[in-house]
Amino acid sequence: MPAAPSHLTTTAVPVLIIFFTLLNRSISSSSSSTTPSLISQLIQPNALVLQPPHGGINNDRRAMFLPLFLSSPTSPLNSSSVVFKSRRHLYGSPSSLRPTAHMRLYDDLLLNGYYTTRLWIGTPPQKFALIVDTGSSVTYVPCSTCKQCGTHQDPKFQPESSSSYQPVKCNTDCTCDNDGVQCVYERQYAEMSSSSGVLGEDILSFGNESELAPQRAIFGCENAETGDLYSQNADGIMGLGRGDLSVVDQLVNRGVISNSFSLCYGGMDFGGGAMVLGGITAPSDMVFTLSDPGRSPYYNIQLKEINVAGKKLSLNPRVFDGKHGTILDSGTTYAYLPEAAFVAFKNAIMEELHSLKQIPGPDPNYNDICFAGAGSDVSQLPNAFPVVDMVFGNRQKLSLSPENYLFRHSKVPGAYCLGIFQNGKDPTTLLGGIIVRNTLVMYDREHGKIGFWKTNCSELWERLHMVVAPPPVPSASNRTNSDVSPAMAPTAPLPHIIPGEVRVGIITFYMLLTMKYADLKPRIAYLSQLISQQLDVNDSQVKLLNFTARGNDSLIRWAILPAGSAEYFTNATAMSIIQRLSEHRVQLPDAFGSYQLVEWNIEPLPKQTWWQQHYMVVVVAIIITVVLGLSASGLWVIWKRRDQTVVSYKPVDSVIPEQELQPVHTQVDTAL
């Protein structure tokens, strides 16, 4: 399996971006000093330069460059976009009444370098795993005509197989192909990877959990890709940024959703999450900050101060307003502060860590700031690390847990490193995905603000009191892989669990993984632990029933047992586990490949015979009887040996000592 990227993952932006990669992993201090001068000759002077964070698994670090200004519609950098008329405000349909698309997120930002969602394109629908990217304004997938595309998670899009596909014909608002027939696009990324192709229009479907009906939209059909785009597992990009080609903008322009969307990333050690296209009712305690679309093409916020353990950092509030200001980007992995802010933050954190020992980072080539002694339980991290508050311009604050600014040390168990770094000499503040772990982020574009709400993203629907309509179960022929969105069907209709009627003693389910038996076998214990965590049960309750190898796949049957000595689950616990299974809320790291929960079933604990119920007592009684019997026999043998006289062997011709004889004659004389 390909190694999971651990470097800073960058995102696309609404214009052509030129990037450069620092490929030498062991750059010396002397060579590092010459690199900026070389790059400065190749990029525009107002570019945003993000210095690489830590080495991670592949020791691969990259700098990120973002342009300061949007190009004009007629400039070469923006000529590949289709420019639409200015947006009109739509009336007659309140935002609260418009449908939303509830979509799951997969993978993990730190392990995989991105989060993906599932999007279906065409008629009949063709499924794709797309990286959710708030910095990109175009959605694209590999096209069947692509001769320079890598092997990805799903098959290439086949326009000829979709009855609803239409090419975007050449017009004055786009860049045309060499034949002057169809509009084309092109995007370039950090390490000189790129994507280019034609623009097409087709029906986009958002999964069976979505209230939003399938909609027509323009997207990119790739004809060539290079670099990481060629080698990554994900199929393509889902652009959520600002721009006429953005999925969000297209749906808003059609009036089918309100001008808002939300993302919710899973916490430390948990991948996945949730996404909502359209508006949702904001929780009463959601924290908001203004976001000015005129400031930059990115989603910016008004950060004014940072507090560590309740103590304000001694900084000028304008330090967070330099250059691009403070940018929130779903595709950037870590967080980057201007030099003065980073130094103050680092010192404040270290002053609060009295019981921890500072240790070297996972990669000796980089000066990661790491600490050992906090333990492996994420829930206990607040006992060792302080709370960090981000205070916005309206004086509302977002409290960050340790998981929002730490990442695990890859070589020392129970050790953690700061996931917030200095942004070189660039005054821009960039907040990546690590900052919003287990946080619902609402991009309320209609009202020019962004909201934050701390929550468990794996339980987002329940916490927001959203009801996801149960979808129809597709036929087996339509289930091309494990990441389909339709709900998993049980082997039998689910009974209404009423006290006294049904007692659930065992919950079983099958899991099919696209992973060879030899690779999966040493990870079974870890897989069992992940399942217990996501089903919110104890590790001892998860039991492996059987394991079957099917070529390159593995089929595992699991059982969830009641806790402790209980004979059955409580109704609430049983329904909670069943709901998590049926809603596909068991999400695994990408290291396990794609997977599918095939079926689940419930049943009471099997009735046991008298022997099954008492066999342990019988076995113990037999053992005690045998031990007592052997002990008694041993004591009897010892007693008998002590009672016997030991007679030594004498040869026949040996001299025998004279024995004293009884005076027989004395008795005879007396008788006479």
Image: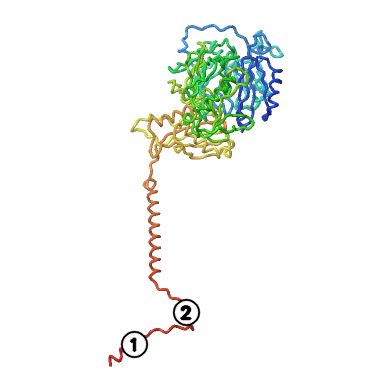
Quadrant placement of the N terminus = top right
Give percent across and percent down for residue 324. Answer: 59, 14
Farthest residue in the left direction? 671
Q: Which residue is denoted by mark 2 in the rendering?
A: 650
92 is higher (above) or lower (below) than 606: above
Q: Tag 2: Cα neighbours inside 10 Å, few (<14), some, or many (≥20)?
A: few
Dividing the picture into quadrants, the one containing residue 419 is: top right
Q: Tell me the element at label 1.
A: loop
Farthest residue in the bottom direction? 672
Q: Tag 1: Cα neighbours inside 10 Å, few (<14), some, or many (≥20)?
A: few
Query: The disc labelled 2 sits on which kind of residue?
Result: Lys
Give percent across and percent down for residue 13. Answer: 61, 16
Q: Is residue 216 visible?
A: no
Q: CA distance from mark 1 to mark 2?
A: 27 Å
Disc ID at residue 164: none
Q: Nearer the viewer, residue 616 or 399?
A: 399
Q: Nearer the viewer, residue 581 or 424?
A: 424
Disc ID at residue 663: 1
Give percent across and percent down for residue 280. Answer: 47, 16
Q: Is residue 61 visible?
A: yes
206 is higher (above) or lower (below) than 507: above
Query: The disc labelled 1 sits on which kind of residue?
Result: Pro
Quadrant placement of the C terminus = bottom left
- Nearer the N terminus, badge 1 or badge 2? 2
